[in-house]
Amino acid sequence: MKKQNSIEENRVMFKTKLTLLFVFILTYGFSQNKVVEIKKLEINTKLDHFAARVVGDKVYFSHNLTSKRGRALRDKYDGFIYTMYEALVNDDGEIKDAKPIVKTELGRFNMSAATFSKDGKYMYFTTNNIDKGSNKLKGIETYNLQIKRAEYIEGKGWTNFMSLPFCDPDHNFAHPALSPDGSTLYFIADVRGTKGKSDLYKVSVSNHKTYGEITKLNETINSSRTEIFPFVSADNKLYFTSDRRGGKGGLDIYSYDLKSTDSEQIPVSLEQPINSRGDDFSFFLNDDLTTGYLSSRRLKGEGGDDLYYFSKF
């Protein structure tokens, strides 16, 4: 009888230890999972800082064009004028020693939301048409957005500015994003056939000299609302911003796996703290696929578009 009791006690003890071990593994395992860490950068002020892109040991971002007194300049339509800044990146993601890029094309013109070739030789950016076009949504003439390409030449800076041939002055083309291999350029536009206020499109690129026919991305990616700020990561995932229904805030960041063969795949809204109740946009992921930058107008920001660095993605 004692032997039977002993066996039963050992079995109960074993089950208890097994349960505790399972709870420990479950708890410890989840506690060790990567939790995305995000921080607001020291460079932020009441002015706008957004669309950060890392190229080699530099980071480029969009910032207000300012007067000598640091006041944000506006165009004749009372809209802000932006320019491109370059800076160094610390190990903790902080942006240091920022300064406007050196370029040969002078004058006060809008320059924002850029993408770069892997070797840093070519830049595509958002600007405005020199000539007026028709704004189909508002029924007025305006200087619509277009995409330009520039080339970096040592000793000169950014030069050889060229408007992309498919940019129709009667429509908006903006927010360029090169694929990892540089063969495809993603962007937004409001051309005829656009589903929402702006949709995501793509075009083939050959040696950064010639371009194919533009193609609209599929109907699950584009919604009846607004899609902006595309980015394609090193593992060929498309990240973009949208104000579609069902989001966590005003503008949210979504992901879509371009490698997937699932015809029913739908874009996925990124979890907090990447997305917030505020506007979150212009996502960028480094080639390590764990660190990067995003832009946001969330609570406890500095008042404009702020840059945030994230890790453990």
Image (spheres, grey):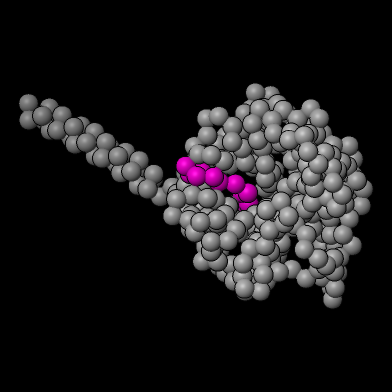
Q: Position of residue 169 (x, y in %)?
A: 85, 43
**Foreground pick, 253 / 147:** 147
Say which residue appears at 50% left-offset and 39% top-offset: 249
* Residue 48 counted in the magenta span: no
Q: Can I make out residue 29 in this image?
A: yes
Residue pictured at 72% horizontal, 56% vertical: 75
Nearer to us in this view, 293 or 61: 61
Measured as percent of width and height from the top left, residue 130 is found at 85, 53
Residues rendered magenta in the picture: 275-290
Return the x and y of residue 188 as percentages of the image width and height: 74, 40
Position of the N terminus by quadrant: top left
In the rendered structure, the answer to whether residue 194 lies left or right of residue 300 reads right
Q: How many marks?
A: 0
- Residue reaching furthest to the bottom: 155
Residue 215's quadrant in the figure?
A: top right
Query: Residue reaching furthest top?
Result: 264
Residue 58 in sight from this viewpoint: no
Give above or below for 301 relative to 179.
below
Q: Residue furthest left?
A: 1
The residue that appears at 73% across and 35% down in the rendered structure is 138
Q: Against 15, is 36 above or below? A: below
Q: Nearer the viewer, residue 146 or 117?
A: 146
- Is 273 placed left or right of 198 in the picture? left
Q: Is residue 280 part of the magenta span, yes or no? A: yes
Outermost right residue? 210
The structure residue drawn at horizontal position 62% and vertical position 73%, both measured from the top left corner, is: 69
Q: Is residue 302 left or right of residue 120?
A: left
Say above or below: 18 vs 149. Answer: above
Question: How far from the left and from the top, in percent, is residue 186?
Answer: 76, 43
